[in-house]
Image (tube, grey):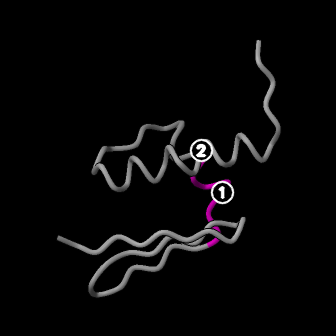
Amino acid sequence: MERRSGQEDCTGALFSFVGLVLGGILMDADDSTILKQLVEQIIVGSSGIEIQFKCGVSIEKDYE
C-alpha cells in the first residue's frame, strides 16, 4: 500500500473537491466529511460562492 504525506492527501482532496464543484457533481458522505475538515469558511454572495480552505487556498464559483 502506498503511503502519502498529509500535505499530499490534502492537495489530492482539494483537487478532487475543485473538480466536483466546477463539474457540478453531487458529493457523497465521504466528500462532505473531508470538506468539513479542510474548509475554514464558506461565503455565499449574491453572484456566487467562495470557499476558503484552512491551508490558505480559496476557490470561487459564480452562479450560472
Residue at 71% of width from left, 40% of height from top?
9
- Per the rendered image, the range of residues in magenta is 34-40
- Disc 2 crowd rating (10 Å Cα; few below 14, some 14-19, many 20+) is some
Numbered circle sitting on residue 15: none
Residue 2 x, y percent position in the rendering = 77, 18
- In the image shown, does 6 or 27 lie closer to the viewer? 6
- Disc 1 crowd rating (10 Å Cα; few below 14, some 14-19, many 20+) is some
For the stretch drawn in magenta, the main secondary structure is: helix
Residue at 47% of width from left, 79% of height from top?
43
Q: Secondary structure at mark 2?
A: helix
Residue at 41% of width from left, 48% of height from top?
19
Decide if residue 52 is on the left or right side of residue 2: left
| The stretch drawn in magenta includes residue 36 | yes
Hey, which residue is sitting farthest top in the picture?
1
Hey, which residue is sitting farthest left in the picture?
64
- Looking at the rendered structure, the kind of residue marked 1 is Leu
Residue at 65% of width from left, 48% of height from top?
11
Residue pointed to by mark 1 = 38
Write down the quadrant of residue 27 in the picture.
top left
Decide if residue 54 is on the left or right side of residue 16: right
Residue 30 x, y percent position in the rendering = 54, 36
On screen, residue 31 above or below 64: above
- In the image shown, does 32 or 14 lie closer to the viewer? 14
Q: Secondary structure at mark 1?
A: helix
Tag 1 near tag 2, CB within 8 Å:
yes
On screen, residue 64 above or below 22: below
Residue pointed to by mark 2 = 13
Residue 53 x, y percent position in the rendering = 63, 66
Decide if residue 30 is on the left or right side of residue 50: right
- The first of marks 1 and 2 along the sequence is 2
